């Protein structure tokens, strides 16, 4: 099943996604991830499709248990929309932000540029985030998470 998903992404989904503005697609992925993280049922179904667990990958560092060493780094989930779904898609930890004290709109658009030749992307958001009050309240509302979560902090 996972090979079918990977093949479908490469041959069908990716070409369609690349027709659109990268920031638009990024925001859609955040919305879908947030939606999938809302209920136990959707998290379990997502986990069956995307998650991989092997005890050899787990680690305990400073008393914190990591299911695996692969995490989502700061910058992708600036406003903590995804913590409830991260474990289900296979991440061993997540980092949100970068978060600033006050909300910040970031740099003017466009803020993402595709590098088609090198298959990369330039990210130029400029610390766009909703501010620590809103984001910390959101995180508290999630309750217990199935993976460790940290926050990148900026000033």
Image (tube, grey):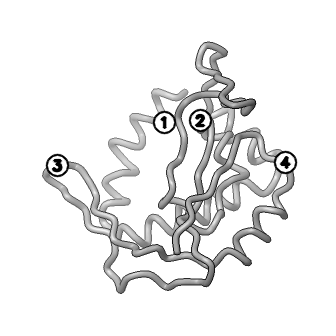
Image spot of residue 17 (x, y percent): 37, 60
CA separation in Å, label 2 and label 3 = 26 Å
CA separation in Å, label 1 and label 2 = 9 Å
Q: Which mark is residue 50?
A: 2
Which residue is at the front of the view, 66 or 87? 66
Q: Which mark is residue 118?
A: 3
CA separation in Å, label 1 and label 3 = 24 Å
Q: Earlier in the sequence, mark 3 or mark 4?
A: 3
Say whether marks 3 and 4 touch (CB < 8 Å): no
Q: Earlier in the sequence, mark 1 or mark 2?
A: 1
For label 4, the crowd category at 10 Å Cα-Cα, with few meaning under 14, some 14 to 19 and many 20 or more, is few
Which residue is at the front of the view, 27 or 71? 71
- Give the secondary structure at mark 4: loop
- State left or right for residue 133 relative to residue 5: right
Q: Earlier in the sequence, mark 2 or mark 3?
A: 2
Image spot of residue 155 (x, y percent): 52, 75
Q: Which mark is residue 144?
A: 4
Image spot of residue 66 (x, y percent): 66, 31
């Amino acid at each position: 099943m996972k090979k079918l998903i990977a093949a479908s992404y490469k041959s069908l989904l990716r070409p369609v996604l690349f027709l659109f503005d990268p920031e638009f697609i990024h925001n859609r992925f955040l919305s879908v991830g947030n939606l999938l993280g809302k209920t136990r049922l959707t998290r379990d179904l997502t986990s069956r499709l995307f998650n991989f667990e092997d005890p050899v990958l787990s680690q305990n560092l400073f008393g914190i248990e990591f299911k695996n060493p692969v995490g989502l780094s700061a910058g992708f989930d600036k406003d903590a929309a995804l913590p409830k779904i991260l474990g289900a898609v296979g991440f061993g930890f997540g980092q949100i932000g970068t978060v600033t004290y006050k909300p910040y709109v970031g740099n003017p658009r466009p803020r993402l540029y595709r590098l088609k030749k090198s298959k990369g992307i330039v990210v130029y958001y400029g610390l766009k985030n909703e501010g620590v009050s809103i984001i910390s309240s959101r995180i508290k509302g999630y309750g217990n998470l199935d993976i460790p979560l940290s926050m990148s902090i900026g000033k």
